[in-house]
Amino acid sequence: MRQAKSRTALHLARALSAEWSRPHWRILCYHGVDPEEKESFARQLAWFAERFTFCTISEGAAFLKSNSLSRPILSVTFDDGDRTVYDVALAVLESFGIKATLYVTADYVVRGRLYRESDAPPAITWEQIRDWAARGHEIGSHSLTHAPMPLCSPKRFEQEVSGSRAILEDIISRPVVHFSYPWGQYNKSTTQRLIELGLYQTSATIHRGAMVPGHDLLCLRRDVIHPRMSVQEVETTMRFADRFYWLRHLKRNGKGYWVTHPEVSWDEAVHVNRVDPMATAPSKSMAGRCL
Ligand SMILES: [Zn+2]
């Protein structure tokens, strides 16, 4: 019964969404891949490989800018810096010849753990980040401390975007030109600040959907996907989002889960708009000591 419902949902989603074989760019947003999720993650990538040509964020952005998109393309990204991206996902990505992008929150790497709970999953190490980049994968910034960017003062905003970039460039010895917003949270003001600072070529949100030439590179769309999902769930979710994601904007602004997330409360109490964030954020020399 449940399977029949799922199949019906998928047929409906296919009927309502645009044809995926048209030239367009999509970006997947993962976080980590646990060892028991390795096979389903591989099944997802195999399914996407039949429908899309994989590309990096740099390549996708270049296609959009040059208006030279001739086929459907897809990028794989990971947010935060979960160590399983290196320990588990990397081998799967490389078995498909995929070059992915890892958006790192520098503070998590310094602390050795994601988020700020003591039992949070381990973060990727600087050495692993270096190896990830050496293998041809991309590193982007996911801010310095995973602060909610729309709530940051101009000074804090600049520290979050420029501080993380400086640390990551120091680690991988190459330019870091891609940014992803913590919790995908952005607004007109954050986009304007990024334009004024001129540090990044692209910034990614978690606003779902497809992109075609003319799309704003500072508001890249991404489909958040869990590696445990079946390919049927993945397709249904993405296709319904293509058609109905605009409904999300009918919700009242400012009360999203990210505002009341315990991590944000910590940020608000200690950092956001009140205290110099660099007091506890990693410095370049601190990053060096943590290798
Ligand atoms: Zn994040």
Image: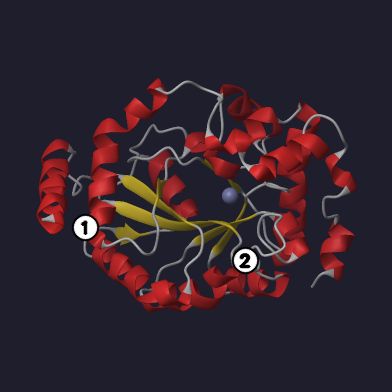
Q: Amino acid at mark 1?
A: Gln
The image quadrant of residue 103 is bottom right
- Neighbor class of circle 2 (other Cα within 10 Å; few <14, some 14-19, many 20+) is some
In contact (CB < 8 Å): disc 2 and disc 1:
no
Vertical comparison of 27 with 90: above or below: above
Picture coordinates of residue 80, whole percent (x, y): 60, 56
Instruction: Identify which residue is drawn at 15% across, 49% down.
Output: 10
Picture coordinates of residue 105, whole percent (x, y): 67, 54
Q: Residue 259 or 223: which is nearer the viewer? A: 259
Q: Which residue is mark 2?
A: 121
Of the two numbered discs 2 and 1 in the rendering, the one whose residue sits closer to the viewer: 2
Instruction: Identify which residue is drawn at 67% across, 71% down.
Output: 130
Q: Is mark 2 within 8 Å of ligand 1?
A: no
The image quadrant of residue 107 is bottom right
Regarding mark 1 in the picture, which secondary structure is present there?
helix
Relative to 31, is 192 on the left or the right?
Answer: right
Picture coordinates of residue 261, whole percent (x, y): 62, 41
Q: Which residue is mark 1?
A: 232
Vertical comparison of 16 with 172: above or below: above
Instruction: Identify which residue is drawn at 73% across, 50% down.
Output: 164
Relative to 111, is 206 on the left or the right?
Answer: left
